Image (cartoon, rainbow, N blue to C red):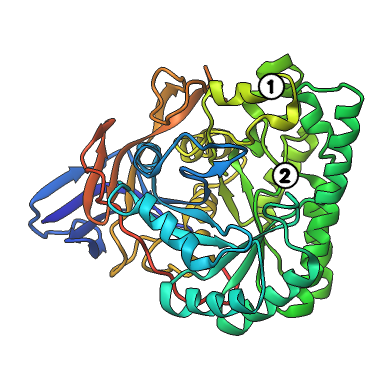
């Protein structure tokens, strides 16, 4: 099958022009003005933006957590992502402490294979680093195409590794062409504050926020950057939320170090005042928590300064009945927030439409940088001859309202209920096939493919 997209405003991380795109099979074959190829299907994109499919590098689908599972699986999660213009996600495999990486990989393959509508890959979370794990890390990079390894500086007893394990992992990963990502918060300090608040009978969601003050994230971010500098390993901080943490990254540039940074759409758009809504604040219990308006200003500035490289979601939804597990104790509220469907449209509406970022920056931080950082460029993340035909045709003027009544995520509330947005994904193309057209799903589960990734050097 062939497809011709005509008369669109083509926007990439570097370019912005009116033109046509010709697709054969799964690949882009030609780009130009007034292309005369004959195609099986022609889409007139006049008045629309045409940009690369979004890549969300931080999602948790069907993830075990706090005695339950996140409520979106590979079918519902990738379908919702496609509705919003995200054509690929990278999920996190969680190694069980004491078990192997390969056993964890097989568990996640059972969740994903034959179920995803959109393309996907994995990060491997290393929770128990030893000599056997070291050998498996090398195999993950060289044989499985999994080149990014997640570490936790919190959640002691389940996910957290110590600094010695972190350095040893970094040395192995650097040697073999991968990168290390991190949940950078000071777990010991957080655990102490949680215990203090619980002992004082302070059990509302507000105390989830107060147990993770800005210093817990700033300190851990700086420590991680120091270990990455010592080992020479590319380092990537996931879901960075605050001024203190970003200033640690900014300070490291003084020694010519580059630390890659991801923030999430909720940290750009929501703030900690939501935790004051009694138990309703449980909807926004996530780690790290929402911060203050001054942190939002810092993150928007960081995007334009090139210090914040990626906008993701940390999509980890739980239905309201699951959140109620913590109705009497904030420390028992499952941590997570639904956003996989809304990232692209929220960032366009709050960013591009309001003049905070350019359309080129939008593409850069939602797609192109992700592909470059995580070893998929130029197959993914760009509109170029030979690239996968992952394309969003986007109506920049379309106004619509976010609501639980119309979203496609498997969760029974919305963090953005009633928000009116400007700009909507109209047609979403994945590997040359129309996947979403005006809200109608055109691909079946199983169309999504696992994407093996190449070695990286930590550059964008």
Front residue (pair 64, 280): 64
On the image, which quarter does residue 127 sit in?
bottom right
Compared to residue 91, the image places residue 70 above or below, namely above
Residue at 50 percent across and 47 percent down: it is: 359
Q: Quadrant of the C terminus?
A: bottom right
Residue farthest to the front? 98
From the image, state whether disc 2 or disc 1 is nearer to you. Answer: 1
Dot 2: element:
loop
**Residue 348 picture location, percent across and down:** 50, 38
**Residue 78 picture location, percent across and down:** 37, 43
The residue where tag 1 is placed is 281
Using the rendered image of the protein, determine whether residue 140 is visible from the camera's viewpoint.
yes
Label 2, label 1: how far apart the Cα atoms are: 18 Å
Is the Cβ of the residue at disc 2 closer than 8 Å to that at disc 1? no
- Total labels drawn: 2
Dot 1: element:
helix
Residue at 26 percent across and 61 percent down: it is: 32
Horizontal side, residue 260 vs residue 228: left or right: left
Compared to residue 76, the image places residue 54 above or below, namely below
**Residue 375 picture location, percent across and down:** 48, 70
Using the rendered image of the protein, determine whether residue 253 is visible from the camera's viewpoint.
no
Q: Which mark is residue 38?
A: none
Residue at 83 percent across and 43 percent down: it is: 191
| Disc 2 residue crowd, few under 14, some 14–19, many 20+, Cα 10 Å | many
Horizontal side, residue 58 vs residue 356: left or right: left
The residue where tag 2 is placed is 241
Residue at 68 percent across and 44 percent down: it is: 300
Q: Quadrant of the N terminus?
A: bottom left
């Amino acid at each position: 099958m062939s497809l011709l997209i005509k008369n669109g405003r083509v926007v990439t991380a570097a370019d912005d022009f009116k033109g046509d795109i010709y697709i054969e099979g799964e690949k882009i074959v030609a780009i130009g003005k007034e292309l005369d190829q004959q195609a099986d299907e022609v889409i007139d994109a006049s008045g629309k933006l045409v940009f690369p499919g979004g890549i969300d590098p931080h999602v948790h689908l069907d993830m075990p957590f706090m005695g339950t599972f996140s409520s979106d699986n590979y079918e519902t999660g990738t379908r919702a992502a496609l509705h919003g213009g995200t054509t690929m996600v990278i999920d996190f495999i969680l190694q069980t402490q004491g078990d192997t990486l390969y056993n964890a990989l097989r568990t996640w393959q059972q969740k994903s294979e034959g179920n995803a509508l959109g393309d996907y890959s994995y990060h491997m979370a290393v929770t128990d680093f030893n000599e056997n794990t070291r050998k498996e890390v090398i195999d993950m990079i060289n044989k499985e195409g999994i080149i990014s390894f997640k570490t936790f500086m919190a959640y002691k007893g389940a996910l957290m590794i110590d600094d010695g394990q972190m350095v040893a992992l970094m040395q192995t990963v650097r040697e073999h062409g991968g990168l290390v990502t991190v949940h950078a918060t000071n777990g010991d300090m957080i655990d102490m504050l949680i215990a203090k608040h619980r002992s004082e009978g302070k059990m509302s969601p507000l105390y989830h926020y107060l147990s993770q003050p800005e210093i817990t994230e700033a300190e851990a971010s700086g420590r991680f950057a120091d270990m990455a500098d010592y080992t020479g390993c590319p380092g990537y901080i996931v879901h960075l939320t605050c001024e203190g943490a970003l200033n640690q990254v900014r300070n490291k540039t003084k020694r010519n170090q580059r630390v890659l940074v991801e923030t999430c759409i909720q940290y750009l758009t929501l703030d900690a005042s939501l935790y004051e809504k009694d138990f309703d604040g449980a909807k926004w219990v996530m780690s790290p928590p929402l911060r203050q308006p001054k942190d939002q200003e810092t993150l928007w500035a960081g995007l334009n300064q090139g210090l914040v490289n990626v906008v993701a979601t940390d999509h980890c939804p739980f239905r309201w009945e699951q959140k109620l597990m913590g109705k009497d104790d904030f420390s028992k509220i499952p941590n997570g927030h639904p956003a996989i469907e809304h990232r692209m449209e929220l960032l366009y509406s709050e960013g591009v439409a309001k003049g905070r970022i350019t359309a080129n920056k939008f593409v850069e931080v939602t797609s192109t940088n992700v592909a470059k950082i995580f070893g998929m460029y130029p197959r993914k993340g760009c509109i170029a001859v030979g690239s996968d035909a992952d394309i969003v045709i986007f109506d920049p003027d379309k106004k619509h309202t976010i609501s639980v009544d119309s979203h496609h995520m498997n969760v029974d509330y919305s963090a953005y209920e009633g928000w009116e947005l400007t700009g909507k994904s109209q047609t979403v193309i994945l590997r040359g096939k129309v996947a979403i057209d005006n809200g109608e799903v055109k691909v079946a589960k199983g169309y999504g493919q696992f994407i093996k990734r190449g070695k990286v050097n930590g550059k964008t």
